[in-house]
């Protein structure tokens, strides 16, 4: 299989590493090899957090600029910041209002590079469903709704089910289902 | 068989235990910090009796491991690359003296730098110390190299360094592993003063013997597949080849595969020193030009010794600073190929168009900042309020971020908060000027390197205020326990040591302990301390500003949750979010009013004390 590259980004405290773990565990359960690169230390205190995840048989953990298949961002500004990592024909998913995203100044670039961009107010959704800290799962579900890449929505939902500790399981799955539906309506 | 999506530092930990490492020491530092806790996790899960400690600093860690190794046990110490500077005195002698049980030094590099004060290349330290060095290209290879390092170390009775760069340490990879077992080797130190306590005459002989070992190790490295290897076809010559190692070697292999460039041969040197002369000569002889891509400095490039054939940092093809991220490597490769009259890999602009476009969007600058509710912020506020005109030497830790609050003027290395304070005092007092100086240093840093400087300053009659920011933890590197709190790395209780006793023991007679959340008291205490410092009969004043880390000790740090609101008195001066820099305070873009982000607010209530307009009130 060709290596599939994910760049996951957002702000410190939004659970980027957990989000990475959900995707990675799903890939692992399907028998793929995985490689990732994380942010720690002083760099982590900076607010901007990025995680690279490669599914397949790559050797190096970092994704080259212009080589990511998917960019999932938990923050609108960070979605723009890491845009150069998306390849031609890549897909962008952002926690932002679909009314205002993307910024008109990048619309031409997206068009020229055939980048599909999708936005959902994931933080707002998670907040409405009583779990603002689950914005990360809301984004995973939203991404899953479009059916791109080697990980299906069912696979990802099963991982969320496995990884959520008892008291949070029901809430997390509900967020997953609601945000998946939101995404489905945009397909 | 088990499988885990392991952090590179976890893979290193696994390699250590698979190799039967019995003694493991370290001082935390990004990107090395997770190795030791991962050793604890694997060791506990397998019920091993590994001896594991957070040492007070890297030199202590090194010496502890060295003693175990000359007692016949397998020992390792790990640190970040600047930590190796602290251990350098021991490190430089170790290869001369040698060891019995395997001794492996893991020195983690931080090209970028992402979380360090330099971009130094540990392989060059290995070269100075005449210590063989291995440079892994993936977490899995790091694990294999550790095991090989122990074998090599025992075969030649010489310490061996493994140098993982940050992209190994903080990479993750799925890794399978089997049951781990105890290494039952018993300590058996055999007295041999001419070796273990040798005089200069014997050191000369040891040096000679070490150089002879190097010839043999170099020979071994010539055939050390897969760590050292090339893919030349027999009797074929090439216009262009690439010499690489470590992290860039993985990037380059991925890249050549992606672009289908089988025409470019690669020499990978995962064990670059002692230099595999024969292997590299074969490669050089077969290629008209070679491009050297190594991280972070020029070890291989110098050892190749052919400036007519070699492209790299010295020819200006590879940048002298910064991390070699994949897009940068692609750009370097393209330019080198074109310079040699060959087709480039691609016409990829290294993302330049996109980076320029994004640069024009004026995205928020996200500089590192202290957490909301961090006690250091309160301390810095009070220090600046009390003595705004002082010089503020500081140190390495979260509190380095006090620079944003205007209370950190210098950061040199671990311990320099104190030693530079005495240096500033000396520089000014020579001119008859009694310059106010307030040094800051964390509790863990004080234990690491503070005491010698403080004793020196007391002895030589320097005058300054030292504020020890005691948050009971080594926070920046990921919440490792500190001596002030006393827990050991495996969760067992050690013996906590009170800062007061140490400071008193250093000869300081003026010691005040306070809680920085009471800023009024702290401002007054700093002012009082300044009086004492200036008094002819005074001396150095130490203030221990004690409050637990808000991340490490959530409940103790905020014993009473204080909810606050902003009143109409606010005139948008911006002090709370720009100068005090609380991450929970911001000015709303739309209504231009200062607001509180309730998700980020730690409810510490310190902001009630700092608002210049008294516009923050308790709810």
Image: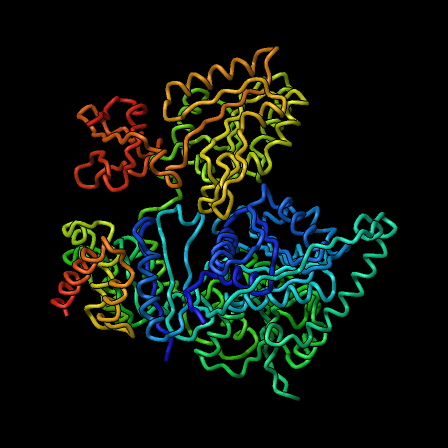
Q: Nearer the viewer, residue B21 or B598?
A: B21
Where on the picture, by quarter, is residue B549? top left
Q: What residue do we see at 31% from left, 63% from top?
A: A22
- Residue B234 percent coordinates (x, y): 64, 88
Q: What residue do we see at 18% from left, 26% from top?
A: B567
Where on the picture, by quarter, is residue B268? bottom right
Report whether residue A47 is seen: yes
Quadrant holding the C terminus of chain B: top left
Name, please, the residue furthest toward the left.
Answer: A185
Q: Nearer the viewer, residue B23 or A43?
A: B23
Q: Tally the marks.
A: 0
Colour treatment of the image: rainbow
Name, please, the residue furthest toward the right.
Answer: B201
Report whether residue B167 is seen: no
Q: What residue do we see at 72% from left, 76% from top?
A: B278
Q: What residue do we see at 81% from left, 48% from top?
A: B197
Q: Nearer the viewer, residue B356 or B101?
A: B101
- Residue A157 percent coordinates (x, y): 23, 66
- Residue B207 percent coordinates (x, y): 81, 57
Determine whether B398 is above or below A173 in the image.
above
Quadrant holding the N terminus of chain B: bottom left
Judge from the rendering whether residue A70 lies leftward or rightward of residue B406; answer left or right: left
Determine whether B299 is above or below B547 in the image.
below
Determine whether A86 is above or below B72 in the image.
below
Judge from the rendering whether residue A19 lies leftward or rightward of residue B318; answer left or right: left
- Residue B203 percent coordinates (x, y): 83, 52
């Amino acid at each position: 299989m060709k290596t599939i590259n994910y760049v996951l980004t957002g702000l410190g405290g939004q659970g980027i590493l957990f989000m990475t773990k959900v995707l990675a565990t799903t890939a692992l359960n399907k028998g793929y090899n995985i490689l990732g690169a994380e942010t720690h230390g002083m760099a982590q205190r900076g607010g901007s957090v990025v995680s690279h995840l490669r599914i397949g048989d790559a050797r190096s953990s970092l994704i080259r600029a212009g080589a990511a298949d998917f960019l999932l961002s938990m923050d609108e500004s960070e979605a723009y910041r890491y845009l150069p990592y998306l390849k031609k024909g890549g897909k962008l998913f952002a926690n932002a209002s679909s009314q205002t995203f993307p910024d008109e100044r990048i619309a031409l670039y997206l068009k020229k590079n055939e980048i599909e961009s999708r936005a959902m107010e994931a933080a707002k959704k998670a907040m409405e469903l009583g779990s603002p800290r689950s914005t990360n799962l809301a984004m995973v579900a939203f991404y899953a709704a479009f059916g791109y890449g080697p990980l299906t929505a069912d696979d990802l939902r099963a991982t969320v089910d496995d990884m959520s500790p008892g008291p949070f399981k029901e809430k997390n799955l509900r967020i997953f289902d609601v945000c998946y539906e939101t995404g489905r309506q945009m397909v | 068989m088990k499988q885990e999506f392991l952090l590179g530092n976890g893979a290193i930990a696994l390699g250590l235990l698979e190799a039967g490492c019995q003694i493991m020491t370290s001082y935390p530092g990004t990107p090395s910090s997770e190795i030791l806790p991962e050793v604890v996790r694997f060791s506990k899960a397998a019920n091993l009796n590994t001896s594991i400690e957070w040492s007070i600093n890297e030199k202590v860690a090194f010496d502890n491991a060295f003693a175990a190794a000359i007692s016949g046990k397998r020992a390792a110490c790990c640190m970040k690359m600047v930590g190796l500077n602290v251990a350098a005195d021991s490190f430089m002698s170790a290869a001369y003296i040698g060891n019995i049980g395997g001794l492996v030094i893991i020195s983690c590099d931080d090209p970028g730098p992402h979380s360090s004060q330099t971009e130094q290349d540990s392989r060059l330290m290995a070269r100075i110390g005449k210590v063989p060095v291995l440079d892994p290209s993936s977490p899995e290879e790091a694990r294999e190299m550790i095991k090989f390092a122990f074998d090599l170390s025992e075969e030649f009775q010489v310490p061996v360094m493994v140098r993982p760069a940050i992209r190994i340490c903080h990479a993750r990879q799925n890794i399978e592993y089997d049951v781990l077992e105890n290494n039952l080797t018993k300590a058996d130190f055999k007295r041999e003063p001419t070796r273990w306590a040798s005089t200069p005459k014997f050191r000369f002989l040891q040096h000679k013997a070490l150089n002879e070992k190097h010839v043999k190790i170099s020979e071994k490295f010539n055939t050390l597949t897969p760590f050292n290897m090339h893919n030349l076809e027999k009797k074929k010559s090439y216009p262009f080849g690439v010499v690489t190692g470590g992290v860039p070697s993985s990037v380059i292999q991925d890249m050549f595969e992606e672009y289908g460039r089988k025409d470019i041969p690669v020499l990978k040197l995962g064990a670059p020193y002692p230099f595999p002369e024969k292997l590299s000569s074969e490669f050089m002889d077969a290629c008209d030009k070679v491009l050297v891509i190594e991280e972070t400095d020029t070890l291989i490039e110098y050892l190749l010794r052919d400036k007519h054939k070699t492209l790299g940092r010295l020819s200006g093809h590879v940048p002298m600073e910064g991390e070699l991220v994949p897009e940068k490597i692609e750009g370097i490769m393209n330019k080198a190929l074109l310079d040699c009259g060959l087709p480039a890999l691609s016409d990829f602009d290294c993302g330049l168009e996109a980076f320029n476009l994004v640069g024009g969007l004026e995205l928020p600058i996200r500089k590192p900042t202290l957490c909301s509710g961090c006690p250091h912020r309160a301390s810095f506020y009070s220090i600046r309020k009390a003595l705004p005109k002082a010089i503020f030497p500081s140190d390495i830790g979260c509190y380095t971020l006090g620079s944003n609050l205007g209370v950190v003027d210098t950061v040199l290395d671990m311990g320099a908060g104190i030693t530079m304070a005495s240096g500033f005092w000396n520089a000014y007092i020579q001119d008859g000027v009694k310059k106010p100086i307030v040094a800051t240093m964390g509790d863990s840093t004080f234990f690491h390197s503070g005491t010698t400087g403080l004793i020196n300053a007391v002895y030589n009659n320097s005058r300054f205020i030292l504020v020890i920011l005691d948050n009971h933890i080594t926070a920046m590197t990921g919440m490792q326990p500190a001596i002030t709190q006393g827990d050991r790395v495996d969760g067992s209780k050690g013996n906590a040591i009170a800062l007061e006793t140490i400071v008193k023991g250093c000869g300081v007679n003026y010691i005040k302990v306070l809680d920085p959340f009471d800023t009024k008291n702290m401002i007054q205490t700093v002012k009082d301390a300044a009086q004492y410092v200036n008094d002819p009969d005074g001396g150095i004043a130490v203030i221990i500003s004690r409050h637990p880390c808000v991340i490490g000790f959530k409940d103790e740090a905020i014993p009473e949750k204080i909810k606050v609101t902003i009143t109409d008195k606010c005139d948008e001066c911006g002090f709370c979010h720009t100068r005090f820099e609380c991450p929970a305070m911001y000015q709303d873009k739309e209504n231009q009013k200062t607001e509180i982000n309730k998700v980020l607010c730690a409810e510490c209530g310190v902001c009630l004390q700092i608002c210049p307009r008294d516009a923050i009130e308790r709810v």
